[in-house]
Amino acid sequence: MRLANLAGRAVVVTGGGAVDLAEASDGRFGPDPAAVFDHWDDVMAFVGGLGSHGAAPALVPVDPARLGPPSPTPRQVFAIGLNYRSHAAESGMEVPSVPATFTKFPACLTGQEARVELSGDTVDWEVELVAVVGRRADRVRADRAWDHVAGLTVGQDLSDRTVQFAAARQFSLGKSFRGYAPAGPWLVTPDEFTDRDDLGLGCTVNGEVVQDARTGEMIFDVAHLVAELSAVVPLLPGDLIFTGTPAGVGMGRTPPRYLAPGDVLESWIEGIGTLRTHLVDQGS
């Protein structure tokens, strides 16, 4: 299943368009995409039966410019640093023995085709697989972790490196300027993947490939992250886990390269799709 946030309404994306969940369910489920995760099992059962009784549900067109983040108002957003050995090496840092965890503040989330204002001249790209929580997870074992994942989406951990490394490394602030967490274009449920633990991912800047790797290279996979995080705090329906980025970021280049106004950032993950972000100057 592909679940999307289309202009603030929860929809199921199909080959020919999208099914509005509230309309197809005759109001059983509301239109709010965030509320879907509080009723995840019921939604999954309902979507699985779409079209099996009576007429096929009506389809609405999917305009990419109207796609918001699949989980628009998560209560918690976790992010993992240095989760690929290649990125740790290019950053000149040791491979962590436990997940290097910080947060991106939820207000920085945005969606497909977003125009994101650059906060300065040292803003970097970081393509990431994002796991969306579908069922509350509290002290969950790794072998049961995927039972609590609603699905996966594409994310960008945009980072103002100057702010990030100022004042004893304020990661959360440097990575939470307005729009610095693009996510989308939709959520894809785990059953849609042949191997949910090994997906190709990468990104381009103005068509030039800058990152290209596989999620199977992660040090701590999705199941491990759910177990580690839920051992500390319950993970709630709709929460996001940005799982880290591979090598290829601008900071790791010689000389360093950063995003500029007018740049178009395209981030993709195998089996999910492509997330496009437009970088603009402040006030644009």
Image (tube, rainbow, N blue to C red):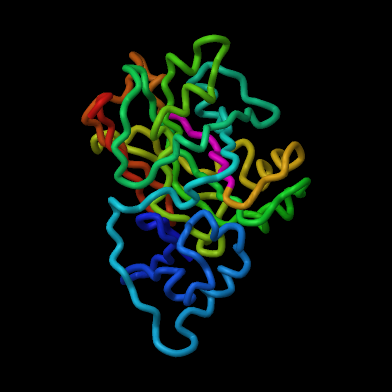
The range drawn in magenta is 239-247
In this rendering, is residue 191 above or below 170? below
Residue 80: x %, y % from top left:
58, 33
User: Which residue ends up furthest to the top in the rendered image?
Assistant: 167
Residue in the image at 47% along x and 27% along y: 175
Residue in the image at 62% along x and 43% along y: 221
Q: Identify which residue, 231 or 266, lies in the foreground.
A: 231
Q: Identify which residue, 279 or 211, lies in the foreground.
A: 279
In this rendering, is residue 75 above or below 7? above
Q: Specify whether residue 242 is painted magenta.
A: yes
User: Which residue ends up furthest to the bottom in the rendered image?
Assistant: 54
Residue 7 horizontal side relative to residue 145, left or right: left
- Classify the position of the C terminus by image quarter: top left
Residue 214: x %, y % from top left:
49, 43
Residue 100 horizontal side relative to residue 24, left or right: right
Residue 141: x %, y % from top left:
77, 49
Q: How many labels does the image show?
A: 0
Can you tell which quarter of the image residue 262 is in? top left
Q: Specify whether residue 71 is painted magenta.
A: no
In this rendering, is residue 257 above or below 206? above
Residue in the image at 62% along x and 52% along y: 237
- Dominant secondary structure (helix, strand or loop) of the stretch shown in magenta: loop
Residue 123: x %, y % from top left:
37, 23
Q: Identify which residue, 138 or 130, lies in the foreground.
A: 138
Residue 241 horizontal side relative to residue 276, left or right: right
Residue in the image at 34% along x and 70% along y: 15
